[in-house]
Image (cartoon, rainbow, N blue to C red):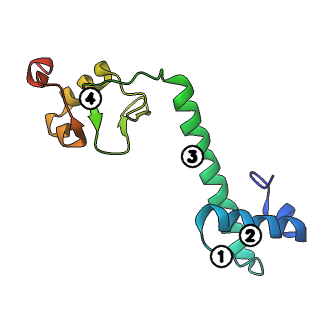
Amino acid sequence: MLYNKTYKEVASSRKELKELATLYQETFSERLDVSCGSCIKKGIERLNTMAKKETVKKEVKKVTPKKVSNDFKLSVAYIREFGSGNTYTNENLTPKVAIAYLKKNENRKSQFSKLPKNIDELLK
């Protein structure tokens, strides 16, 4: 696996360069110039960054219970709770989290495609 490998480790092996180019193409739908040292370094960094993001997404899903609320539905991909760094999607958004999020700023209602009929009462 190429993730978390150094430039020297990858650049010294044709097999790993080929694997890097293939993985880069499959991940980003872009060609990686493996004859360019700078391109190799940037490619490795970009793949490692992507791997870290995917790991964080998996950890968020593990930590946050999956509770689907029929009263709240996001129109955006996700919302983030500032301070704690928790990320919520339609799959793990609870009414309690949605109400707390909206209480901080009622203009955030535009980020929801569905809200309960009594939302104004809930926000008081």
Nearer-N-terminus badge (1/4): 1
Where residue 24 sits in the image (x, y, percent)? 68, 65
Q: Amino acid at mark 1?
A: Arg
Mark 2, secondary structure of its residue? helix
Residue drawn at x 82%, y 70% is 18
Please rate how many residues cluster around mark 4, counting C-alpha atoms within 10 Å: few if below 14, some from 14 to 19, many from 20. Answer: some
Residue matched to label 3 = 53
C-alpha span from label 3 to label 1 = 21 Å
- Mark 2 touches mark 4? (CB < 8 Å): no
C-alpha span from label 2 to label 4 = 42 Å
Residue matched to label 1 = 31
Residue matched to label 4 = 72
Mark 1, secondary structure of its residue? loop
Farthest bottom residue? 35
Where residue 34 sits in the image (x, y, percent)? 76, 76
Residue drawn at x 74%, y 67% is 22
Q: Amino acid at mark 4?
A: Phe
C-alpha span from label 1 to label 4 = 41 Å
Q: Amino acid at mark 2?
A: Ala
Residue matched to label 2 = 21
- Mark 1 touches mark 2? (CB < 8 Å): yes
Residue drawn at x 19%, y 26% is 103
Q: Amino acid at mark 3?
A: Lys
